[in-house]
Image (cartoon, grey):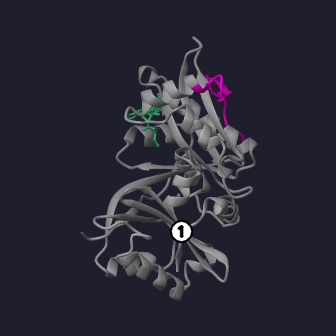
């Protein structure tokens, strides 16, 4: 029953996902994650997606975000639908490369219902903890000391310089930025660069509005290595929250490996509330 979507169907999948209720406290798969993956092109995104439909309606979406990680989300009305969840589990357990690659693999499933119990009963085990962090946008977002500019073709070099300094192994480049801005999830989204008093580009973030009037995601966020420890991380997270509020989002949220204590501390410093940890499920080898 799993479907490997066509490039032509990507916009529709994203549109349908935007109608789902979204619980930022669990930080499940968000349209922003699909949008960020679009940097590799529409064909790569379609290849990485697995989709389940029931009566023609989107019931579940999985994104093979890493070679050994499927990030899965299920439509709210299907999470407690035992027969659907049992079919999903059967698909995950089957030796079927259209669903999961062979070998050791993890599934992210941050939603309620019986899925976790069913996978644990089949010998799957919990993986490393992640921490969701959420900022409610119903009240004003405080100001900060950075000058914030939207990334455009003239500012992309600044954005890339900060990005590569914050994420040393990243291969993100101009072509990829162009590709992600052309994807259906980038509307509405914004990429920001923060400049300090010396006009140096010091921080960057991309924010993705998701469900209409619902939570929006930060992905990615980072501060230039040479400028860390000066409050720029806190400032760019406040700028991200302000941008999402302007776009009509109810919350700004993010999730980060709990081991990234610097990131957790930075989001907290910007008023993001730390939520209970969530864990992926790892299939036994
Ligand atoms: C995480 C990161 C953005 C922090 O940027 P920064 O500019 O150094 O952060 P700030 O100076 O604004 O610090 C904000 C708060 O976090 C704390 N903090 C920052 N890095 C920390 C660390 N490594 N360990 C503990 N606390 C840390 C600061 O002490 C400060 O706390 P305070 O307000 O209570 O004093 C930066 O280290 C970075 O870009 N890392 C690599 C990319 C990354 O991990 N991004 C997040 C992915 S989700």
Position of 26 with respect to 108 (left or right) is right
Magenta-drawn stretch contains 151: yes
Mark 1 nearby-residue class (10 Å; few <14, some 14–19, many ≥20)? some
Figure check: 118 above or below 138: below
Residue 169 place in picture, x, y as percent: 37, 35
Label 1, ligand 1: CB separation under 8 Å: no
User: What's drawn in magenta, residue-wise?
Assistant: 140-156
What's the residue at 61%, 23% (across, down)? 146
Magenta-drawn stretch contains 117: no
Q: Which residue is mark 1?
A: 4
What is the quadrant of residue 166 in the picture? top left
Position of 64 with respect to 249 (left or right) is left
> Viewer-proximal residue, 122 or 240?
122
Q: Residue furthest top?
A: 198
Q: Residue furthest bottom?
A: 83
Figure check: 56 above or below 213: below
Residue 279 place in picture, x, y as percent: 39, 62
Residue 256 place in picture, x, y as percent: 44, 48
Q: Main secondary structure of the magenta part?
A: loop
Can the viewer see residue 231 in this picture? no
Q: Secondary structure at mark 1?
A: loop
Q: Quadrant of the C terminus?
A: bottom left
Q: Quadrant of ligand 1?
A: top left
What's the residue at 34%, 46% (across, down)? 259
Figure check: 259 above or below 191: below
């Amino acid at each position: 029953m799993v479907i490997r979507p066509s490039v032509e169907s990507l916009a529709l999948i994203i549109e349908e996902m935007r109608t789902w209720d979204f619980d930022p406290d669990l930080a499940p798969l968000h349209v922003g994650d699909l949008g960020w993956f679009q940097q590799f092109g529409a064909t790569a995104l379609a290849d990485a997606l697995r989709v389940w439909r029931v009566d023609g309606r989107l019931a579940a979406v999985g994104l093979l975000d890493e070679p050994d990680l499927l990030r899965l989300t299920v439509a709210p009305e299907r999470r407690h639908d035992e027969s659907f969840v049992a079919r999903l589990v059967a698909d995950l357990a089957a030796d079927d490369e259209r669903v999961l690659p062979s070998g050791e693999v993890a599934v992210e499933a941050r939603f309620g219902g019986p899925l976790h119990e069913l996978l644990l009963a089949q010998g799957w085990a919990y993986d490393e903890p992640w921490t969701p962090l959420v900022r409610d946008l119903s009240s004003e977002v405080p100001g900060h000391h950075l000058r914030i500019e939207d990334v455009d073709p003239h500012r992309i070099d600044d954005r890339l310089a900060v990005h590569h300094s914050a994420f040393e192994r990243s291969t993100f480049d101009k072509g990829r930025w162009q590709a992600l801005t052309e994807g259906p999830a980038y509307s509405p989204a914004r990429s920001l660069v923060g400049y300090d008093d010396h006009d140096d580009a010091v921080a960057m973030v991309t924010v993705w509005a998701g469900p209409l009037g619902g939570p929006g995601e930060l992905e990615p966020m980072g501060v230039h290595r040479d400028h860390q420890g000066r409050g720029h991380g806190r400032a760019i997270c406040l700028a991200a929250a302000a941008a999402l509020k302007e776009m009509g989002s109810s919350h700004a949220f993010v999730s980060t490996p709990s081991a990234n204590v610097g990131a957790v501390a930075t989001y907290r410093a910007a008023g993001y509330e730390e939520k209970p940890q969530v864990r992926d499920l790892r299939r036994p080898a």
